[in-house]
Amino acid sequence: MKILKIGGSFITKKSGYRELDAPNVQKMAKTVAGLWKKGVRNFVLVHGAGSFGHQLVIKYKINEGVETEAHKLGYADTHAACSELSLVLVEVLINDGVPAISIPPALVMEQKGKRISKFNTKIVTDYLDNGFLPVLYGDMVLDSELGGSVCSGDQIVSYLGKEAECMILATNVDGVLDDRGKVISKITSANFAGISKHLKKAEAGDVTGTMAGKLKELLSLDTPSYIVNAGHPERIDALMNGKKAVCTEVRKK
């Protein structure tokens, strides 16, 4: 099983409010449909919430927990928005011939202190084994310590990635960039410390953490991952087929 993750910054206008990037959604669907038609089907699709999640989490002040009635309404509204985005993507995929099934994280997992503690992955693998494309996404989930918390698409990728062949993270840039704007071809545990000093901080409105934090998460896994530009379908196609492409490879060693 492989994991393909599409960043929320690619499929939504992240600085907006529940604003879809329609051309990029169509491009994403064509990329996935192209893989499907070629028989590349043993993968799970995960997508970020972008402006359908981040802005609402800030608006309702639920990044640090869900306690009050106002928080619970905000939790419900944020979950509804994230689900709305996923259903839009799934509908586009279905129209392109892909039997995509949206699986709401709020219904299949829980967290403890913002970390996944329970995850019914069987529903994911069952759909995969029966010829469907499981689609998961950044969402609000119950949290045994905080009442509720954000579960990012990156966290889902890391959790599923423990058993995956590889993880391909498609975003709106060519990979992890150095100070000169050039792609860093490979990041390992050995060179991470030097590279992390030059990484940008999290963008305003991003409640899922910094790039350094996301890379550290990926480096904790034995599974290799590849950060690639979602605007270049041929690169995603190559990586999904075990070939080389312009990207940043992230692996422990």
Image: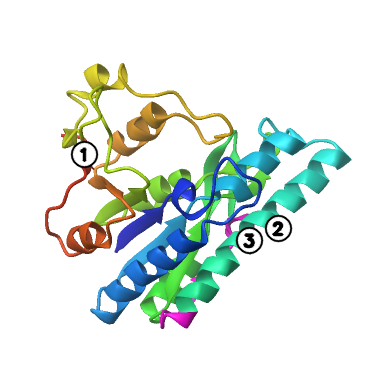
Badge 3 crowding class, 10 Å Cα cut-off, few under 14, some 14 to 19, many 20 or more, is many
Q: Nearer the viewer, residue 234 or 67?
A: 234
Ranked by sequence position, the earlier of labels 3 and 1 is: 3
Which mark is nearer the camera, 1 or 2? Answer: 2
Report the side of 4 relative to 249 (left or right). right
Report the side of 46 relative to 165 (left or right). right
Q: Is residue 58 magenta?
A: no
Which mark is nearer the camera, 3 or 1? Answer: 3
Please report the bounds of the magenta region as a residue range: 95-108
Label for residue 80?
2
- Going by the numbered disc 3, the residue's amino acid type is Ser
Label for residue 251?
1
Ranked by sequence position, the earlier of labels 1 and 2 is: 2
- Going by the numbered disc 1, the residue's amino acid type is Arg
Q: Most extreme residue toward the front, as rendered?
A: 23
Q: CA distance from mark 1 to mark 2?
A: 35 Å
Q: Nearer the viewer, residue 60 or 164?
A: 60
Relative image position of residue 252 (x, y in whole percent): 21, 35
Q: Is residue 106 magenta?
A: yes
- Going by the numbered disc 2, the residue's amino acid type is Ala
Q: CA distance from mark 3 to mark 2?
A: 5 Å
**Mark 3 — residue?**
83
